[in-house]
Each structure stands twice: as C-alpha cells, then as structure tokens.
Image (tube, rainbow, N blue to C red):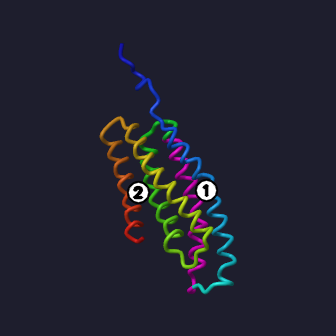
Amino acid sequence: MENLAGPSFPRSSLRFQVVLHLDNWLTPALAAVVLFLLLVKPYFHRYPPGIALGEFLLMLLHPPVQALRSWFGTAGNKQERAAFMAVFLALSVWTVLVVGYFFLLQTCAIYLESILAGGALILAILEILEGGLAGSLFCDGFWEFGMVFIGFVASASSVALLVNLW
C-alpha cells in the first residue's frame, strides 16, 4: 500500500541543528564584545569620522537578522520545509558579509574580536553547507529545489567574495 503521508523516515539533519545551536551562542558573544569595544576603542585608537558609528550600527542590526536566520533554519530543519531553508540560505549572505567584515576588514580589530568573528564565520560556512544539503533533501519538486539552489549559490558566492578579499 502506498504511503500517502510522504517519506516515513526523518530527513532533518542533527549536524545542522548542532552547528546552528553553537552559532546561537557565539553570535551574541561576538555582538556583545564588539559593541562594548566599539564604545571604548574610539577613545584609544584613531578612527576615520563616522566609521565607529557605522560599525556600531552594523553590529546592532546583526543579532536580530541572525535570530531571524536561526529561526528559519531551525523551523526549516525540524519541519523539513525547503522554502524555510531557502530563506535561511539567503539570510546567510548577510551573516557571512557582516561577520567577514568584522573578521577581515574592521578598521581597528582586537584579537578577541577576530577570534570570535573567525569562529562565527567558520560556523556560518558549516551552516551553509549543512543547510544546503538538508534543504535539498527536503525538496518535493523542481520549484523548491530551485529556491534552495539559488539560496545556496547566493550564500556560497558571499563566501567566495570573502575568500577573494582575503
């Protein structure tokens, strides 16, 4: 007899969920350290006009976007929805570019910031790989696969851009 409820085995990824959970702890730590140091660093180091404020606002916007990205990744993985995984992969472009900025291009970086940003960047890359794999497994048609593929290409392109800047 045909199974009308879909596949009888779970397709969600435990590895993806673990990496996402680690990133949910590292991102607030990175944001707290960067925001605190951006209040202190302009008094001790020379910053071009407006750069410290721009970096502060960028890092202030990062946790809400990251929380939204994390929600889409968790919901997409647990509910096995390809569309949510596609949104997760698209929001990963923001994460890679912001964390990559604080890892490679920040005006005045301290070792702690660089270490946290590097760890967050590694986790983001692992999340993109695991999310792309999990999202492709959740696809029920060509349209869903196309959405996941476009999200994966966009996020992988942002990683390639950072590699070229390095």
Res 155 label: 2
Q: Residue 131 appears at what percent x and percent y?
A: 44, 46
Q: Residue 107 appears at what percent x and percent y?
A: 54, 79
Question: Which residue is found at the position 62% from the left and 62% from the top?
Answer: 30
Question: Which residue is found at the position 54% from the left and 47% from the top?
Answer: 19
86 and 109: which is toward the camera: 109
Separation of disc 2 and disc 1 at Cα?
20 Å
Secondary structure at badge 2 equals helix
Q: Which numbered disc, 2 or 1, marks the residue closer to the eye?
A: 1
**Magenta residues (range):** 48-76
- Vertically, is 161 above or below 17? below
* Residue 163 shown left or right of residue 70 in the figure: left
64 within the magenta span: yes
Residue kind at label 2, given as amino acid type: Ser
In the figure, residue 153 lies in which quadrant?
bottom left
In the figure, residue 9 lies in which quadrant?
top left
Q: Residue 82 appears at what percent x and percent y?
A: 42, 41
The number of callouts visible is: 2
Secondary structure at badge 1 equals helix
Residue neighbourhood size for the residue with mark 2, other residues' Cα within 10 Å, grouped as few (<14), some (14–19), many (≥20): many
Res 26 label: 1
- Vertically, is 87 above or below 9? below
- Vertically, is 16 above or below 124? above
Residue kind at label 1, given as amino acid type: Leu
Residue neighbourhood size for the residue with mark 1, other residues' Cα within 10 Å, grouped as few (<14), some (14–19), many (≥20): some
**Looking at the figure, which quarter contains the N terminus?**
top left
